[in-house]
Image (cartoon, helix red, strand yellow):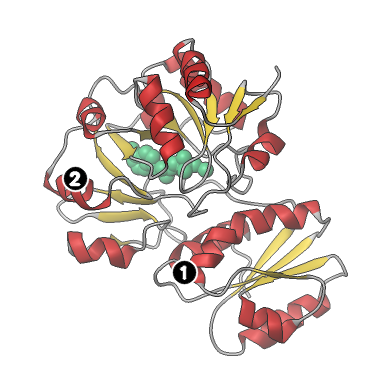
Amino acid sequence: MKTEILQPSPAAYEHCAKLIRSGEIVAFPTETVYGLGASAYDEEAVGKIYAAKGRPSDNPLIVHVCDEKQIDEVAFINDFARVVMARFMPGPMTMILPKKDIVPYRVSGGLETVGIRMPDNDVALSFIRFCGVPICAPSANVSGRPSPTTAKHVFDDLAGKIPAILDGGACRVGVESTIIDLTRPVPRLLRAGGMPLETLEAKLGKIEVVDTLNSKVALCPGMKYKHYSPKAEVYLVAAGGDQEERIRRKYNESGNKTAVICLDDMAAKIGGPDVLRAGKDSEEYAHNLFALLRRCDELGYDTVVAQGVTEEGYGRSVVNRLTKASGGKII
Ligand code: AMP
Ligand code: MG
């Protein structure tokens, strides 16, 4: 199958909507990462997403909507959801709500709940509007690889497996949505992401945080899988204390195909051609992380030493993604 990369235009949206209506899958940009979408009501098309990604089928998909009417169509809206819809949608966050029957179990991974998100990206919203149905989508990468933040990343992973990629340029946020379970008396954080927890708590009150990385039971399907990995071995150097020393030591003791990913001020201290700058703060780090991991593979590095940051604000999602990418190899 030939994979077309399309620049956004009414004709391109109509073309992609036609593909979706005929049971095909299409990659599209959002403000977080690129998604691989199908009609949320077309079970056969949903099956093609799992096949193209090589994704385990008990890992649920997020349903992307362009307006509140579509939310009402797929889920039972409660008081928390009303606050989220008023304050945070569109935006980089996903809410888990009880699903309505119209959502196939193939989308929800067999659960009675559904993840819903309204992307803050004009190309995504126009695409969904042209399709006329909610679009379920995981990230548009081969399962286990770093999420794609450009159309080229999608092409590198999925060329020949999907008919079209809508090109919206580089994603503004660059890390997946924050996921909040709103089906409980106290909302619970299921995944740190593009919307800082602190910002959500300011409007929703206390949000329960569980240590999803170390918990023995998977709170939701998907959490048990290794994720976001480049081909290189990743080591996460935890924040605090003698972090600079620990980065230097790992960098020096590893072979000459070792890259260091770190914040700008640390990069200035470490120096050298193998140092990739992640930005000036955690927000920029979250934005750049996936692209940098892919870049390390392109440059032929076999080891990546990545600087950890404090787990607050955007730092929470940086540490979460690096912990998973490293498979728990923390220094
Ligand atoms: P991705 O599409 O790769 O960003 O991953 C979607 C993730 O959202 C899944 O791996 C789950 O962790 C989570 N998710 C989606 N739907 C639900 C749901 N109904 N309940 C709990 N978690 C969900
Ligand atoms: Mg993903």
Mark 2: C-beta under 8 Å from nearest atom of ligand 1: no
Q: Quadrant of ligand 1?
A: top left
Q: Is residue 191 visible?
A: yes
- Secondary-structure class at tag 1: helix
- Considering every residue shown, the one lying at the far right of the view is 256
Residue 244 image offset from top left, x and y in percent: 66, 86
Q: Residue furthest left?
A: 79
Residue 156 x/y as whole percent? 71, 38
Which residue is painted at 56% across and 57% down in the image? 324
Gap in angstroms between the C-alphas marked 1 and 2: 25 Å
- Which amino acid, mark 1? Gly
Quickly name the residue at label 1: 315
Front-lying residue, 226 or 178: 178
Tell me which corner region of the image, top left, top right, bottom left or bottom right, holds residue 101. top left
Mark sitting earlier along the chain (1/2): 2
Q: Secondary structure at mark 2?
A: helix
Q: Which residue is mark 2?
A: 81
Q: Position of residue 260 (x, y in %)?
A: 72, 71
Asked if residue 262 is positioned above or below residue 109 in the image, the reply reads below
Residue 117 figure quarter: top left
Mark seen at residue 243: none
* In the depicted structure, whether residue 240 falls above or below residue 220: below
- Dot 2: few (<14), some (14–19), or many (≥20) neighbours within 10 Å? many
Q: Quadrant of the C terminus?
A: bottom right
Mark 1 vs ligand 1: CB below 8 Å: no
Number of dots carrying numbers: 2
Question: Three-letter amino acid code at disc 2?
Answer: Ala
Give 199 or 252, whichever is nearer the viewer. Answer: 199
